[in-house]
């Protein structure tokens, strides 16, 4: 039974190496900005007024 968790751990480590993962928060933030670009927040008040609510 101990063999399966080690195999899973090895696969995880290999995937992390391929993705060039590290513990740096700065690098994480840079990658996150590339992946998750968001539009600026919309003005909810103007949206409600135009919908008649």
Image (spheres, rainbow, N blue to C red):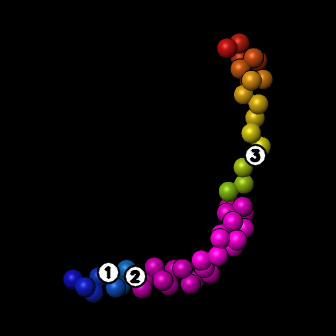
Which of the numbered marks, if any, corresponds to residue 5? 1
| Residue that numbered label 3 is attached to | 39
Q: Residue furthest left?
A: 1
The range drawn in magenta is 10-35
Q: Residue furthest top?
A: 52
Where, by quadrant of the figure, is residue 27 drawn? bottom right
- Residue 24 among those drawn in magenta: yes
Structural distance between the alpha carbons of marks 3 and 2 = 37 Å
Task: Tell me, yes or no, whether the two marked residues, 2 and 1, touch with CB atoms within 8 Å.
Answer: yes
Residue 11, image x and y in percent?
43, 82
37, above or below 42, in the image: below
The dominant secondary structure in magenta is helix
* Residue visible at 76% across and 30% down in the picture: 43
**Residue 45: x percent and y percent?**
74, 23
Q: Earlier in the sequence, mark 3 or mark 1?
A: 1
Give the residue at x 71% y 17%. Answer: 51
């Amino acid at each position: 039974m101990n063999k399966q968790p080690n195999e899973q751990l090895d696969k995880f480590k290999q995937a992390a190496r391929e993705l060039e993962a590290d513990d740096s928060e700065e690098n994480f933030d840079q990658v996150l900005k590339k992946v998750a670009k968001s539009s600026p927040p919309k003005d909810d008040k103007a949206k409600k007024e135009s919908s008649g609510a």
